[in-house]
Image (tube, rainbow, N blue to C red):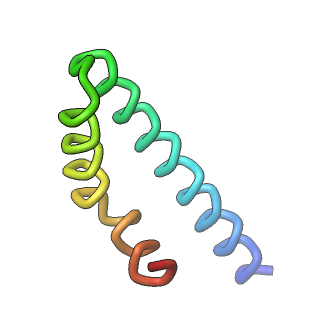
C-alpha cells in the first residue's frame, strides 16, 4: 500500500512540474513576443528544473 502511495505522489509531482513548465513557457510567450528568445528562455528554464532533468536522463 505504501509503495502505491509513493508512486501516486511521484506521478502527481511529475504532473505539477509539467504544469509549472507550461506556465513558465506561457509567461515567456507574454514577455518575449518573438520566437528565438522564447525558445532560448524555455530551454534555459527547462534545464534549470531538476525534475525535468531527471526525466531527461531517462527519456533522452
Give 17 or 56, whichever is nearer the viewer: 56
Q: Position of residue 14 (x, y in %)?
A: 55, 59
View extreme (right): residue = 1
Give 60 or 18, whichever is nearer the viewer: 60
Position above or below: 28 against 55? above
Q: Quadrant of residue 8?
A: bottom right
Q: Position of residue 56 (x, y in %)?
A: 41, 73
Tell me how many marks there are.
0
Q: Position of residue 7 (x, y in %)?
A: 68, 74
Q: Position of residue 31 (x, y in %)?
A: 23, 17
Q: Quadrant of residue 47?
A: bottom left
Q: Quadrant of the C terminus?
A: bottom left
Q: Is residue 7 left or right of residue 15?
A: right
The residue lying at 40 percent from left, 82 percent from top is: 57
The residue lying at 59 percent from left, 67 percent from top is: 10
Q: Is residue 56 left or right of residue 8?
A: left
Q: Is residue 42 left or right of residue 25?
A: left
The residue lying at 29 percent from left, 43 percent from top is: 42
The residue lying at 76 percent from left, 76 percent from top is: 4
Amino acid at each position: 500500500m505504501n509503495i502505491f502511495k509513493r508512486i501516486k505522489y511521484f506521478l502527481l509531482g511529475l504532473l505539477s512540474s509539467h504544469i509549472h513548465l507550461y506556465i513558465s513557457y506561457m509567461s515567456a510567450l507574454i514577455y518575449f513576443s518573438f520566437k528565438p528568445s522564447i525558445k532560448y528562455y524555455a530551454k534555459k528554464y527547462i534545464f534549470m528544473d531538476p525534475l525535468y532533468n531527471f526525466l531527461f536522463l531517462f527519456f533522452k
